[in-house]
Image (cartoon, rainbow, N blue to C red):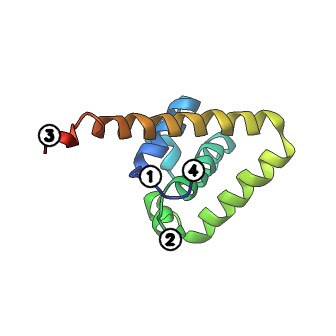
Amino acid sequence: MNGNNNLQPGEIIGIVNEYYKKDILEVLDRSRYSDKIKVLHISMFFCKQFTKLSLSRIGMSFNRDHATVLHAVKSVNNQMDVYRDYKSEIDEIRERIKNKLIDGFAKYEIYDTDRV
């Protein structure tokens, strides 16, 4: 499921922030509180999974560098391997993102191509 869509990092950040009930600007600031870092890492993880953007471009969306994105992706993968609850959260967010993709795709299905 890597990159076959039109989702932008901002949409993914919004979905993750909504799940954790965080303010986008609060998460994107440079502070290093663990709850903010968790949301930031998960957002980067899904940007890597659901967009065709390079690590550098994803990092720019978060005002970070490519190494931070790479660390975030590895961190989320490691956390999912260790903590069952964390993996459940990731799976729930993934479903929300997929639903967003389906909703976005459905907008284009209203056009009747037989009439063209």
Q: Residue at x 82, y 36 (%)?
A: 84
In the picture, measured across the screen, residue 2 lies left or right of residue 38, that is left
Q: CA distance from mark 2 to mark 4?
A: 15 Å
Residue that label 4 marks: 46
Whether pointer 2 and pointer 4 mark residues with C-beta atoms closer than 8 Å, the reply is no
Q: Nearer the viewer, mark 3 or mark 4?
A: 3
The type of residue carrying mark 4 is Phe
Q: In the rendered image of this protein, does residue 9 appear above or below residue 107?
A: below
In the picture, measured across the screen, residue 90 lies left or right of residue 9, that is right
| Residue neighbourhood size for the residue with mark 4, other residues' Cα within 10 Å, grouped as few (<14), some (14–19), many (≥20) | many
Q: CA distance from mark 1 to mark 4?
A: 9 Å
Task: Return the disc, 2 or 3, that comes first in the chain's sequence.
Answer: 2
| Residue neighbourhood size for the residue with mark 3, other residues' Cα within 10 Å, grouped as few (<14), some (14–19), many (≥20) | few
Residue that label 1 marks: 9
Q: Nearer the viewer, residue 27 or 69?
A: 69
Coordinates of residue 7 in the picture (x, y in percent)? 41, 49
Q: CA distance from mark 1 to mark 2?
A: 13 Å
Task: Return the disc, 1 or 4, that comes first in the chain's sequence.
Answer: 1
Q: Residue at x 69, y 34 (%)?
A: 89
Q: Quadrant of residue 34?
A: top right
Residue that label 2 marks: 56
Q: Nearer the viewer, residue 6 or 17?
A: 6
Question: In terms of secondary structure, where does tag 4 sit?
Answer: helix
Question: In terms of secondary structure, where does tag 3 sit?
Answer: helix
Task: Return the disc, 2 or 4, that comes first in the chain's sequence.
Answer: 4
Question: In terms of secondary structure, where does tag 2 sit?
Answer: helix
Which label sits on residue 115?
Answer: 3
The type of residue carrying mark 1 is Pro
Q: CA distance from mark 3 to mark 4?
A: 38 Å
Task: Return the disc, 1 or 3, that comes first in the chain's sequence.
Answer: 1
Coordinates of residue 5 in the picture (x, y in percent)? 43, 52
The type of residue carrying mark 2 is Ser
